[in-house]
């Protein structure tokens, strides 16, 4: 069932992938895979420009976060640099009724869901743990324990089926994000088992950014990841994760299959983590500069920019305006992050249980009393 | 209509009522469907409520709990069966890192009304992994509530209360008591039932307090009856809720009696008995005639079936501890 | 990479399997699978008769155990009835230096390793927990927690490689036994990940007996299990698990590939659990008699007996002698099981730690003293 | 040659020596190779001992421990690194059902000399799952030994002793102390080193006993120093071994001082402090001037980084407890 073949371009991984926009901005009309599925997009100029704006914006906001962390305003940051197309392409492929289960790196998907980009900053600043309502935003809380969210996504998707919300074009679909390293976790493989058995309306979106912190892909598998799906009874496909068009096309098709009742798909978005794993990481210890260089040539933004230019879909003014607007958003974000209030100490006792607990109440009271004992004591 | 039924049957009735009362309640686990579970606790439920409400799952405990989390986010109220105490550990990561933490993590935005049913404890002559008492692993975990029942009436009401609660509840079922009978008011109004997170004085007494829960309540009551013959009037408290523990009831009792003995099957080292002893000593320091003593499983892995009688607390060991408390 | 095709006979599952002996005792000379591998056996008459003796003996001993359990002499028993060919075929395919990691049902494999069949009875009688030395018998202790032994087998196999014991015909190989239900466990899938990444010399031998207690295969997968392997980068193959010849041929080939350094193989032995899951189970609650009947027709022993008869490899006298000998062994086993001593109470404190613990010593002493206090008190 | 090095570097030296001394010792975990671990504890080891001795594993904790079991059966001595405390739970099943039980199950025929290294505890301003203290989950499990170090010298000797031991050892490393320096005798003869399973009096005192381990030993010592200024002479005991606990040292001290305060970061409910309080009360009942008090993390999930200062026991909370003990 696995498919990943494509018109082999330059630097295409063995097994190929679906690519609709080459690194130098050449548009591939459509790609037909071994199983006969044809992938293509027909965007209006407006939509093309919109995708470009998304890519530039999420990269600019990410850069701002990296800077904030360096300045000590964030405890840590997980940068998406290099993975903008994988996240914008899949994020824009989601329909409003679809539900997303992110890891800790899906800031670009969050943005494409129309969510205020400041939402995850509480977590990275350490003022909270990312406390938002998954159902309000159709975007689950960030999950830090590798792979656990794939089972949550699978259960949620089972619920979609139980609610009778599949089997039609306006059905609901679920997307689970995870990385190449996560594919080794038992829980992720269990989510494949369950999705196959229950024919869950889910898309497993694996951003293969080539590394799990310092470990290259060979530490997780010796065959392409998209091939994992076949053994669980659903299709796997690899897409050029630095190609926003192909990522959009492949994800949209998989989501629609899911919502129509055709079950799960595994998508391997072949991309690269251009930055450090997180701000705590030092990638120079485990990878060479030339490798990073070779991926610079496949940059997701420059290829779309080249295409828009060649096709005269956009001009210099537009590109400048996009940069300026992103810059404004970044500065606005920075201001609001700096303005984030620290939590009240006593807040550490909040929300342990929906129904509370006399033990927690007693500890909270004792804590408050103890805190009060310092009032004016210079502490 | 009050009926005399087994603890297992009482759970079955309770689950049936929960499925009837709320279409969002789903039961999931290994062999819970056609088979009705290896202990038949879900007997007949799939036949009557369908495969979408009573779900035979793949053989993967992490999957059971992990998908239950997703179902709960979707608005369902999953009741998960773990087949035996010793098989909950593959799901431990989902339970302590996700089920227990998501409400806190999300600042109260995500509620996970999940009940995790675990038949637990020994005394059934089983092979390894089928007789354990892992309650401390869960009670030590903030964000989880942990309860256990000791008789059919409590089994019937507590399982329903646990399912109605928005808190994640680990529900320990004393498997060796599944076949013990008792009166249950099946028509009973749940709102009038004894609260889920309250301890109950199972036997009033004056000379010492026995603290027990689940399968050991019967042992404690038998010990109290035997002690009565020797003229010792023991109070027996059925904890019922292991996290949070209902301390006021316990403190009131021990302050009266001046002596306390905790009984549980789990290994003593860092077991629930340790916390009870520590808390009681803090609160009742000047009332205690003797240190709080513990009668527990030994700090060994659960032994082979032919050794479990020696391993498990019994009437004699409880009375021996009571003697020591009086002799202190 | 997956392969399972064969000359489709009657009742061959979709996707086929390797079969060298049909249910009615017709010998298939050889089977060549899609990847060009040819499977065959050429046994001497002596060896054929030996396999028959194995099958009859393990079935007879199993029947004795079932009887002992019914009579209250065992706490529980997990019968291998119906799976004799899968266990004898794979068990006899092992070379002396190979290491096996069983579940709780591999009594037939244990027997073929030349181990006294009484070894696991301590566990089922409840006098111990199966305390034997895996390295002495090249047969690990029974594992009850589903799937966990597959990771132990994988680690052991990594050790074989680290010891330089692969890459030659007299290299060592490892076999991990597990069931169809176990394939859903995260740990089992992790063992596939690890074996692929480390090219471990291991054979994953899955006895698909169609059920995990009451749950039919569809609760674990919607595609054949042998196909699981491809996604981890090693071959999967399905064999007729009721055909001792095919099971032997396929397992021997996979083991030799492993010992030669060619890495893991997943074998799905397609068979059927003729009895209850264990003595505690009541299969009438979840499967129909006609299904069991249809599998009776594929009985592993009768087909070999028919073959031996037709080929005049064995006569009635031989069959009678085999039955009589197995009968003797069974009665001898019974006697020795009944003679198993109960453990000393204080033994429950033994072997908690290799180096012991003062806490355990203190508890042991207190226990002994407490026990002594009952001496003569009628307790 | 004694050197002044950090606790993290001491561990690195200890691991290096273990690799040098026994070719069967292998280190395995996520990012332990080229990267040298996220805390650099295995820095340089793969370069010097090769990829077969220092193994970068797939991202799967159950796999790390499960394959370590197989390697141990094969005769190896695996030293497994769990990257952070909050990520040990996927391996929990292998640890409690296999690592802890196999020696007992096999009647002593299978020894699993496995060391599981876990950087633990808070105070580093991290995100969720990176600051937990799960020691009670392991210390409550028969068959596991559990230790933790509080200074570079102990880090260096204890990690080597743990690797030499045939017992499965869960080795908790106080991550917030990785960068604290101390004198270490790198040439030291291990056979002469302080035993692995022994507590140490870190500061002799007479008025009350502070019991601490890992990251909290420093806090306890600072509290004792502060108390000294108020004329209170506190004894500080560094437990070092959490299972089994070295009770004789503790009992001797508390019988002298009459007061004890336990300090740990883990939630108090059914934490190690509960067991210490219960056991001390049993053994020193008539010597106690006050109940054993506990200063611990609260019974909530570990909070967001900006709240951890309030969550973690500190000098003031310890002194407050000491005051209460004296005021009882
Ligand atoms: C269960 C678990 N183990 C270890 C970690 C520590 N950790 C955080 S990110 C990471 C690597 C993840 O790699 P991948 O899945 O490829 O995602 P990426 O970070 O590359 O996007 C690890 C090991 C964790 N968060 N959870
Ligand atoms: C982790 C775990 N969960 C549940 C069980 C209970 N259990 C024992 S056997 C079994 C079914 C196993 O099915 P399969 O893997 O097909 O092996 P079979 O018994 O059919 O040979 C179950 C669920 C267990 N032993 N371990
Ligand atoms: Mg990655
Ligand atoms: Mg099976």
Image (cartoon, coloured by chain):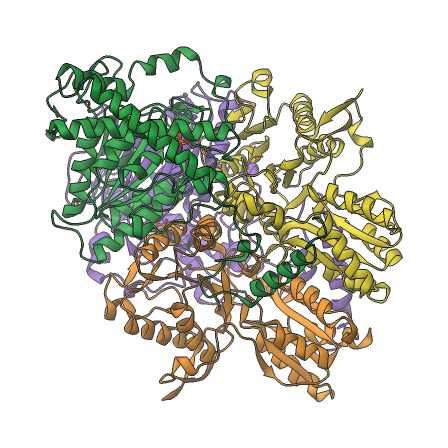
Chain colours: A green, B orange, C purple, D yellow
Closer to the camera in the image, D57 or A8 = A8
Left or right: B31 as drawn, with respect to B192: left
Q: Answer left or right for D256 relative to D160.
A: right
Name the spot of residue D298 as percent of width and height, x first. Answer: 60, 55
**Is B157 placed above or below A126 here?**
below
In the picture, measured across the screen, residue A314 lies left or right of residue C130, that is: left
Give residue A80's position: percent from left, percent from top: 37, 29
Q: Which quadrant is the C terminus of chain D positioned in?
A: bottom right
Residue B149 in percent (x, y) is at: 50, 73
- Residue A335 position by quadrant: top left
Q: Is residue D107 left or right of residue C3?
A: right
User: Which quadrant of the frame does ligand 3 lie within?
Assistant: top left
Residue plotted at (77% across, 61% down)? D324
Residue C321 visible here: no
- Quadrant where the image shows the N terminus of chain D: top right
Residue D64 placement (x, y as % from top left):
50, 35
Question: From where the camera sits, is residue B321 visible?
Answer: yes
| Residue D40, above or below C134 | above
Quadrant position of residue B14? bottom left
**Residue at 44% in and 74% down:** B158
Query: Who is closer to the viewer here, D134 or A327?
Result: A327
């Amino acid at each position: 069932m696995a498919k990943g073949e494509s018109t082999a371009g330059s630097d295409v991984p063995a097994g190929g992938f679906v690519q609709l926009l080459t690194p130098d901005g050449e548009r591939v009309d459509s790609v037909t895979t071994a199983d006969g599925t044809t992938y293509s997009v027909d965007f209006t100029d407006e939509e093309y420009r919109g995708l470009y704006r998304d890519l530039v914006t999420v990269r600019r906001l990410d850069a701002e976060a990296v800077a904030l962390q360096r300045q000590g305003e964030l405890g840590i940051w997980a940068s998406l640099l290099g993975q903008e197309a994988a996240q914008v392409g899949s994020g824009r492929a989601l329909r409003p009724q679809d539900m997303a289960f992110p890891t800790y790196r899906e800031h670009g998907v969050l943005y494409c869901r129309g969510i205020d980009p400041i939402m995850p900053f509480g977590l990275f600043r350490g003022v909270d743990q990312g406390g938002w309502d998954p159902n309000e935003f159709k975007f689950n809380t960030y999950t830090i324990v590798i792979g656990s969210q794939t089972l949550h996504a699978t259960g949620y998707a089972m619920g979609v089926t139980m609610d009778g919300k599949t089997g039609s074009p306006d059905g609901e679909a679920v997307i689970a994000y995870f990385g190449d390293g996560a594919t080794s976790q038992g829980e992720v493989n269990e989510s494949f088992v369950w999705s196959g058995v229950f024919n869950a309306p889910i898309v497993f979106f694996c951003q293969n950014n080539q590394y799990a912190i310092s470990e290259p892909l060979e530490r997780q598998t010796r065959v392409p990841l998209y091939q994992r799906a076949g053994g669980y009874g659903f299709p796997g496909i690899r897409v050029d994760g630095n190609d926003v068009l192909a990522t959009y096309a492949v994800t949209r098709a998989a989501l629609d299959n899911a919502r129509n009742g055709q079950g799960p798909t595994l998508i391997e978005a072949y991309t690269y983590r251009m930055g450090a794993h997180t701000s705590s990481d030092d990638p120079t210890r485990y990878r060479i500069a030339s490798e990073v260089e070779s991926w610079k040539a496949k940059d997701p933004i420059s290829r779309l920019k080249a295409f828009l230019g060649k096709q005269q879909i956009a001009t210099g003014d537009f590109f400048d305006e996009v940069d300026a607007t992103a810059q404004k958003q970044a500065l606005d974000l920075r201001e609001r992050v700096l303005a984030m209030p620290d939590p009240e100490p006593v807040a550490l006792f909040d929300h342990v249980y929906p129904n509370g607990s006399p033990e927690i109440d007693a500890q909270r009271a004792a804590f408050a009393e103890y805190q009060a004992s310092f009032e004016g004591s210079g502490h | 209509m009050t009926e005399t039924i087994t603890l297992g049957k009482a759970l079955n009735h309770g689950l049936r009522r929960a499925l009837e009362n709320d279409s969002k309640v789903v039961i999931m686990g290994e062999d819970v469907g056609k088979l009705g579970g290896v202990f038949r606790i879900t007997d007949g439920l799939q036949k009557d409520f369908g495969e979408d409400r009573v779900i035979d799952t793949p053989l993967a405990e992490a999957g059971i709990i992990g998908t239950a989390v997703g179902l709960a986010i979707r608005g369902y109220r999953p009741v998960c069966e773990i087949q035996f105490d010793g098989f909950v550990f593959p799901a431990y990561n989902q339970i302590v890192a996700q089920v227990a933490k998501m409400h806190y993590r999300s600042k109260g935005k995500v509620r996970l009304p999940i009940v995790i049913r675990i038949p637990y404890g020994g005394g059934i002559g089983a092979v390894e992994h089928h007789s354990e008492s892992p309650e401390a692993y869960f009670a030590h975990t903030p964000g989880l509530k942990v309860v256990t029942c000791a008789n059919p009436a409590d089994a019937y009401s507590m399982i329903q209360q646990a399912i109605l609660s928005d808190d994640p509840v680990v529900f320990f079922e004393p498997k060796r008591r599944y076949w013990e009978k008792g009166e249950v008011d099946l028509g009973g109004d749940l709102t009038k039932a004894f609260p889920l997170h309250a301890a109950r004085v199972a036997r009033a007494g004056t000379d010492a307090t026995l603290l027990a829960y689940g399968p050991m309540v019967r042992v404690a009551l038998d010990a109290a009856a035997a002690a009565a013959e020797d003229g010792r009037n023991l109070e027996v408290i059925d904890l019922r809720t292991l996290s949070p523990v209902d301390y006021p009831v316990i403190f009131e009792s021990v302050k009266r009696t001046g002596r306390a003995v905790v009984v549980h099957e789990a290994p003593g080292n860092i077991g629930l008995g340790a916390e009870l002893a520590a808390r009681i000593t803090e609160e009742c320091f000047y009332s205690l005639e003797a240190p709080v003593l513990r009668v527990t499983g030994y700090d060994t892995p659960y032994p082979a079936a032919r050794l479990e009688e020696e391993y498990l607390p019994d009437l004699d060991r409880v009375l021996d501890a009571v003697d020591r408390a009086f002799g202190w």
